[in-house]
Image (spheres, rainbow, N blue to C red):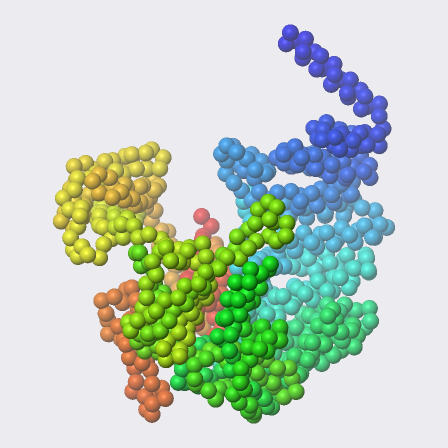
């Protein structure tokens, strides 16, 4: 029976092949499409593969594309590489198919698994090593485009131009963004495909490529493909060839180059320096002087760090953008980009001139955004910065940032917050069809007054006054401190109109009363107090709650929900506190609290849910075991010392351990072999501690070991590693300058690698990382907890630089990184590069500190240099 079935199958297969042989290629392709429409992907794939093997014509590229599509539908992406390479061998002279194959490699999943040395693309279950193949696919696409260029007819310039555009795209693939732009300075090997998983080094914003001296690497357009010294020059040559054969691509090519230059050589690369654009321009040594740049120079963050340098003619992106955005048929988006380039340089006057030119050429822009931008730059403009709540009895000081204005008109009104709260309650008690979210937030009263014209909440006018301003030149922002002429508690709306510009508003809160809450075991405590001293106040507490109940069935036809409300009123005694039991505050309601003192003070607490998390003994009675070994890594035959401590996290136990004199065991496991040792019959000491030791055998398995504590104590686990010791063959030394370096000078450090037998390491690569830290030489006597909190953690004195003479004899308080308002900067990665080692075993590293002087010239700095050397072995 089995033999008969196989014979029948062969007959059917033979009939199918004979049927296909009798049909034309067009008929077979149409049949494959019909099969695919019906979901018969396997049969459609068989026909497409047959066409690829037997027919070579202008539609063969479509056969390849169809075959790959059918594979994806069958979830058999692993077979894509075989289909592609077979088609490339069969159609090695068909440039259209070769081009399609190059595109298909980029459309496939760029990862897979290695199984017994064989690569399987796509997802896989059942073992194997995951590897990526994006770099390999990129090189293969480049190879195929080069092969296609050798097949195309000489007079088919349009198609050749398209192929060169494809070649440029594959060369620059993943290399024009900030993470891997440095790779344009590398010459990719196009003869041998990279290994699977070899994707090269990745970094976060490493900067544009540089030469061995740290200067910008100029990517010239070479005379030929063979003359290109790196992928960047190959990319530019391919773009130039595409334009030579297809002049219609010139504008797009120039736009691509201009955007590349702005992205990697503009001052926008300095974004990592934080708020340098907002610093005070008058501080000559406290700001990066980007506004002093000429159109032919720039300051950019390169792979070697931040540098100020002149741009060669081909790299001068400002004149290039101006040419590309001039004329009625020019690119308006590049004109907008040019304006932004000037604004990034803080050259607002020049940016405004270009903006007027763009408006005259390309119009006002969508939504008149160009005209609005010009008004922001040249007009009289101002805004308030965020104002914190102020204590009553002190006049609030507000920061007002303005531009171009010589005076500002100020108007101050009181706000009727009681009316705001009453209307809020009435709105919810009226069971509205839609809840107005702006009404629920009392803090948004300013927006409602300005945008919704709700003037009924505007109280009496307090004062009108004018303040003279001193705007800086060049349309730069200036900050003024405005003092309000009021110190009584309440909410106030302050309006500021700079010159003839548009007004801005801010709501200022002055408080004399505070309301806080605290969850108790059986209820909720509310405490009413003076906001400054914290002393208790007697008065009233009103709580207003609401919840939304959705209607069901027929009731939902007229409206979707109902709003349920509750009110609770309590008296607050002389101690300033009142406790509400669990049952009083329904956890399904959102509650707003209003506290009013007998002195007339008021405090608000916005809507929130009061849900109880019952205090459970387990949360306050956690028991843990903590363990350590005497070192993290061991060699075979060494002794491992292990100790665990078991404790209960309770503040009422003092030095008493609940796990003293308890039986326990220590088990040692290896990930591959399981339990390898067990230390039995151990007992904890009076502090809950237990010790153990184990001598590693000579044949101990290398890798990670886990140590487990078990028994009458809480379970605990730690781990250690066992590794073979390999004596280093060479040493690496970083030689710093002998003389002190003044900030702004160039530091020259030297990395030296020497074999222990005395010869220098001559064949290898050196990865150098340079970091900059803020530094202080202020000396403090040592403290017991310096290792945890830093030197001077115990210092409670304050700085008084305003006191005459203090700067000469005062001791500056320590400045930890988290302290606000002090001149402290986060660590900065100055340099992260790989160098080829010199014949004498050294690498010369130059560190430019001039930018640090411009940006942070008022503090000291510390630079660290780390080097990692890999020799040819």
Quadrant of residue 147 within the rendered picture: top right
Q: Is residue 539 above or below residue 471?
A: above
Q: Out of 367 and 631, give the one closest to the viewer.
A: 367
Q: Evaluate whether residue 620 shows in this view.
A: yes
- At horizontal 50% and vertical 32% (from top left) the residue drawn is 126
Give coordinates of residue 684: x percent, y percent. Answer: 16, 45
- At horizontal 23% and vertical 69% (from top left) the residue drawn is 783
Q: Out of 774 and 524, give the one closest to the viewer.
A: 524
Q: Evaluate whether residue 819 shows in this view.
A: no
- At horizontal 26% and vertical 72% (from top left) the residue drawn is 794
Quadrant of residue 67 within the rendered picture: top right
Quadrant in which the N terminus appears: top right
Q: Is residue 93 above or below residue 32?
A: below
Give coordinates of residue 658: x percent, y percent. Answer: 17, 48
Q: Give the tally of numbered discs.
A: 0
User: Furthest-top residue in view?
Assistant: 1
Give coordinates of residue 663: x percent, y percent. Answer: 17, 39
Give coordinates of residue 673: x percent, y percent. Answer: 33, 33
Q: Judge from the rendering whether residue 816 lies leftward or rightward of residue 356; answer left or right.
A: left
- At horizontal 71% and vertical 62% (from top left) the residue drawn is 256
């Amino acid at each position: 029976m089995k033999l008969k079935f196989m014979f029948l199958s062969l007959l059917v297969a033979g009939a199918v092949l004979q049927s296909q042989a009798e049909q034309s290629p067009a008929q077979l392709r149409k049949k494959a499409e019909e099969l695919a429409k019906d979901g018969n992907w396997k049969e459609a794939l068989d026909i497409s593969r047959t066409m690829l093997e037997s027919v070579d014509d202008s539609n063969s590229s479509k056969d390849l594309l169809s075959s790959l599509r059918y594979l994806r539908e069958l979830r058999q992406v692993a077979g894509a590489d075989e289909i592609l390479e077979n088609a490339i061998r069969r159609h090695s002279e068909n440039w259209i198919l070769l081009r399609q194959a190059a595109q298909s490699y980029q459309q496939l999943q760029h990862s897979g698994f290695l199984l017994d040395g064989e690569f399987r693309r796509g997802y896989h279950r059942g073992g194997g090593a995951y590897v990526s193949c994006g770099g390999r696919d990129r090189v293969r696409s480049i190879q195929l485009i080069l092969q296609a260029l050798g097949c195309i007819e000489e007079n088919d310039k349009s198609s050749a131009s398209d192929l060169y555009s494809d070649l440029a795209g594959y060369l620059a693939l993943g290399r024009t963004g900030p993470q891997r732009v440095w790779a344009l300075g590398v010459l990719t090997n196009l003869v041998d495909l990279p290994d699977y998983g070899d994707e090269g080094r990745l970094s976060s914003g490493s900067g544009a490529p540089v030469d061995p001296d740290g200067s910008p690497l100029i990517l010239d357009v070479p005379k030929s493909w063979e003359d290109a010294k790196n992928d960047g020059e190959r990319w530019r040559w391919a773009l130039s060839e595409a334009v030579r054969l297809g002049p219609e691509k010139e504008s797009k090519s120039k736009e691509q180059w201009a955007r590349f230059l702005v992205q990697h050589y503009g001052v926008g690369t300095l974004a990592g320096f934080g708020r340098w654009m907002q610093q005070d321009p008058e501080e000559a040594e406290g700001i990066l002087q980007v506004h002093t740049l000429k159109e032919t120079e720039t300051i950019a963050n390169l792979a070697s760090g931040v540098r100020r340098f002149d741009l060669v003619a081909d790299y001068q992106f400002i004149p290039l953008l101006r040419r590309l955005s001039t004329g009625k048929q020019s690119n308006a988006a590049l004109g907008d980009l040019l304006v932004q380039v000037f604004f990034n340089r803080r050259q607002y006057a020049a940016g405004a001139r270009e903006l007027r030119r763009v408006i005259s050429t390309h119009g006002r822009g969508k939504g008149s955004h160009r005209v609005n931008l010009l008004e922001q730059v040249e007009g009289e403009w101002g805004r308030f910065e965020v104002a914190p709540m102020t204590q009553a009895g002190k006049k609030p000081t507000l920061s007002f940032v303005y531009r171009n204005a010589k005076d500002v008109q100020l108007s101050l009104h009181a706000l009727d917050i009681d009316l705001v709260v009453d209307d809020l309650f009435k709105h919810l008690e009226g069971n509205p069809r839609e809840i107005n979210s702006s009404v629920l937030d009392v803090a948004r009263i300013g927006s409602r007054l300005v945008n919704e014209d709700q003037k009924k909440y505007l109280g009496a006018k307090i004062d009108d006054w004018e303040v003279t301003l001193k705007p800086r030149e060049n349309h730069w922002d200036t900050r003024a401190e405005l003092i309000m002429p009021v110190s009584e508690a309440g909410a106030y709306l302050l309006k500021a109109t700079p010159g003839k510009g548009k007004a801005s508003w801010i709501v200022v809160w002055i408080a004399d009363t505070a309301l806080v809450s605290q969850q108790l075991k059986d209820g909720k405590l509310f405490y009413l107090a003076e906001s400054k001293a914290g002393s208790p106040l007697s008065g009233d507490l009103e709580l207003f709650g609401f919840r939304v109940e959705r209607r069901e069935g027929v009731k939902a036809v007229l409206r979707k929900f109902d709003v349920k409300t509750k009110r609770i009123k309590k008296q607050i005694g002389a101690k300033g506190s009142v406790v509400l039991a669990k049952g009083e505050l329904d956890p399904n309601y959102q509650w707003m609290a209003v506290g009013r003192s007998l002195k007339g003070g008021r405090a608000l607490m916005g809507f929130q849910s009061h849900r109880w998390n019952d205090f459970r003994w387990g949360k306050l009675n956690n028991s843990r075991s903590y363990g350590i070994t005497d070192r993290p890594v061991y060699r075979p035959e060494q002794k491992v010392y292990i100790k665990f401590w078991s404790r209960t996290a309770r503040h009422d136990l003092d030095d008493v351990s609940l796990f003293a004199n308890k039986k326990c065991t220590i088990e040692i496991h290896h990930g591959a072999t399981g339990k390898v040792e067990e230390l039995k019959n151990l007992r904890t000491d009076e502090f809950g501690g237990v010790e153990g030791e184990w001598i590693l055998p000579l044949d101990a398995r290398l890798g990670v070991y886990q140590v487990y504590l078990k028994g009458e104590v809480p379970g605990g686990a730690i781990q250690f590693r066992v590794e073979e010791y390999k004596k280093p063959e060479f040493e690496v030394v970083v030689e710093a300058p002998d003389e002190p370096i003044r900030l702004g000078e160039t530091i020259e450090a030297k990395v030296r690698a020497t074999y222990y037998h005395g010869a220098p390491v001559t064949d290898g690569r050196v990865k150098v990382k340079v970091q900059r830290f803020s530094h202080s030489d202020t000396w403090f006597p040592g403290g017991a907890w310096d290792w945890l909190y830093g030197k001077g953690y115990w210092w409670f004195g304050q700085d008084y630089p305003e006191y005459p003479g203090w700067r000469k004899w005062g001791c500056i308080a320590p400045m930890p990184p988290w302290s606000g308002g002090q001149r402290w900067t986060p660590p900065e990665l100055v340099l992260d590069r790989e160098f080829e080692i010199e014949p004498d075993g050294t690498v010369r590293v130059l560190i430019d500190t001039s930018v640090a002087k411009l940006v942070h010239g008022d503090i000291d700095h510390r630079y660290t240099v780390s080097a990692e050397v890999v020799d040819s072995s």
